[in-house]
Image (spheres, grey):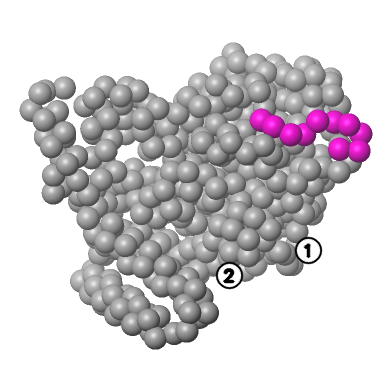
């Protein structure tokens, strides 16, 4: 790299521009110094689908005989095996793809959804009720490890598992930032666009004016709360302090976003009609584009994307007759068997994941690309079936994970439930937290049945730790 560029980047680190374009500038400094990928921020995208992931559909044909035994750990080079047909869109990323099967989650609630348990590892909720939030879910924990202007972005096609809401702020019941504190998700791509990129870009002059008015109002509110807090009794100041902290964080976030306007403008997708479309697959694509842009611009390092729920109908895929719920209950749809319908939906999801991975792989970073420092984790909130019994909870992971996990290009299948060597989703998420800087002994609740039978559950999965 030319000496002149190195000098500029070095001076920028201590000069007046230190805060300007900070995420992209930081990456440029690391590249100028020849830093390997470990110096770059890690990004996480949790992609949550409804109605389970049918485990046999993920097994490469050449591994099916091995998997049928289910008594020992299978840890294979995935690149040596042809992917199942519905996973073929991920073939360009096969060396950075991991298929993980055999993990159980019976400490969570079975049924249409495990709610917060899917990423919090505990039992909560009912058929229509998301239940009590005991702890932060793992996606929120990972977001805290690599903070950014928007610490954690939630995007959703629909709300709760059977909900029909499709607009505005939703609470799907899958992500929590702490006990009793659910992460809000944005369903409307056009609103999400303005929330994420409105500080730097407005689709029209009116939107920019609205953003400026909201910023001014926020300043007044912070000042008013500060003045009020000084007049309160000591016993009340702590309570009001929580409100003040929240508004100050919003104020600071707007300031950080304003200073990043050039970087945001460069990365933001052009605003178009797709951000206002009501068609599910168009909205899903818009959310994928927003996810990629938010990561590339550096305004966030963590996104949870709720792709669908069981009330979703995939009309544009030729599946207009039944919702995901009906297909999950093995009803035929537009002349397709339930298995064929699920294959069509899975193939569509894999195309979305491939699109996201492709956008990140196109961005150079150090001696590789952004995808090398990203983990895209695809899972279902109901485990292995429409009414998941949680004896298995499959995952797909795309990306290099910064080299911190031995997942890239691997196929892993753990021994079946109750067998020696069996592992749970508690072990899975414990591994992720430990690998990225949170050395917990065990994340989530234990499976009491496994505990009674003496099956060890604590700790990380040693075969995944680099």
Nearer the observer: mark 1 or 2; the answer is 1
| First to last magenta residue range | 451-460
Cα distance in 3D space between marks 1 and 2: 19 Å
Residue sticking out furthest to the right = 453
Q: Are marks 1 and 2 in contact (CB under 8 Å)?
A: no
Residue 455 is inside the magenta segment: yes
Magenta: main secondary structure: loop
Residue shown at the point (28%, 57%) measured from the top left: 257
Position in image of residue 431 (x %, y %):
62, 33
Position in image of residue 164 (x %, y %):
62, 68
Residue 241: image quadrant is: bottom left
Residue sticking out furthest to the left = 4
The answer to whether residue 124 is above or below residue 300 is below
- The 10 Å Cα crowd at callout 1, few under 14, some 14 to 19, many 20 or more, is some
The answer to whether any part of residue 293 appears in the image is no
User: In terms of secondary structure, where does tag 1 sit?
Assistant: loop
Question: Which of the labelled discs sits on residue 126, or is there none?
Answer: 1
Residue shown at the point (46%, 53%) measured from the top left: 152
Q: Is residue 373 left or right of residue 10?
A: right
Residue 89 is inside the magenta segment: no
- The 10 Å Cα crowd at callout 2, few under 14, some 14 to 19, many 20 or more, is some
The answer to whether residue 124 is above or below residue 434 is below
Q: Is residue 6 left or right of residue 244?
A: left
The image quadrant where one finds the N terminus is top left
The answer to whether residue 367 is above or below residue 140 is above
Residue 204: image quadrant is: bottom left
Q: Which residue is mark 2?
A: 165
């Amino acid at each position: 790299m030319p000496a002149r560029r190195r000098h500029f980047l070095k001076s920028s680190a201590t000069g007046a521009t230190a805060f300007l374009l900070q995420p992209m500038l930081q990456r440029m400094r690391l590249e100028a110094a020849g830093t390997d990928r470990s110096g770059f921020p890690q990004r996480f995208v949790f992609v949550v689908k409804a109605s389970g992931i049918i485990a046999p559909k993920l097994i490469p044909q050449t591994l099916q005989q091995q998997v049928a035994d289910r008594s020992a750990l299978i840890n294979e080079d995935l690149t040596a095996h042809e992917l199942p047909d519905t996973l073929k869109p991920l073939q360009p990323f096969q060396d950075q793809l991991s298929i993980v099967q055999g993990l159980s989650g019976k400490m969570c609630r079975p049924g249409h959804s495990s709610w917060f348990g899917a990423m919090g590892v505990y039992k909560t909720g009912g058929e229509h009720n998301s239940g009590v939030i005991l702890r932060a879910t793992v996606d929120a924990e990972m977001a805290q490890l690599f903070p950014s202007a928007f610490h954690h972005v939630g995007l959703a096609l629909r709300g709760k598992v059977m909900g029909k809401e499709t607009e505005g702020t939703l609470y799907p019941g899958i992500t929590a930032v702490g006990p009793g504190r659910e992460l809000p998700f944005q369903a409307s791509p056009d609103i999400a666009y303005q929330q994420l990129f409105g500080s730097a870009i407005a689709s029209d002059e009116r939107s920019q004016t609205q953003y400026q008015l909201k910023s001014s109002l926020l300043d007044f509110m912070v000042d008013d709360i500060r003045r009020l807090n000084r007049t309160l009794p000591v016993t009340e100041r702590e309570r009001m302090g929580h409100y003040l902290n929240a508004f100050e964080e919003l104020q600071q976030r707007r300031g950080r976003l304003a200073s990043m306007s050039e970087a945001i403008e460069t990365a933001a997708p052009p605003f178009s009609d797709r951000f206002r479309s009501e068609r599910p697959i168009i909205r899903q694509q818009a959310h994928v584009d927003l996810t990629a842009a938010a990561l590339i611009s550096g305004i966030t390092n963590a996104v949870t994307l709720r792709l669908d729920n069981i009330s979703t109908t995939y009309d544009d895929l030729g599946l207009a007759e039944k919702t995901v719920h009906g297909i999950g209950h093995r009803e035929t749809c537009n002349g397709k068997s339930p298995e064929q319908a699920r294959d069509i939906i899975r193939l569509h999801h894999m195309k979305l994941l491939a699109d996201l991975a492709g956008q990140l792989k196109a961005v150079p970073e150090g001696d590789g690309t952004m995808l090398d420092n990203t983990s895209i984790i695809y899972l279902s909130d109901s485990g292995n079936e429409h009414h998941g019994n949680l004896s298995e909870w499959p995952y797909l992971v795309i990306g290099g994970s910064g080299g911190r996990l031995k997942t890239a290009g691997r196929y892993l299948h753990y021994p079946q439930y109750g067998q020696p060597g069996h592992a749970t989703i508690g072990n899975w998420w414990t591994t992720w937290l430990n690998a990225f800087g949170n050395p917990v002994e065990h994340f989530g609740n234990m499976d009491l049945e496994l505990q009674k039978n003496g099956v060890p559950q604590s700790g990380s999965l040693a075969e995944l730790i680099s």
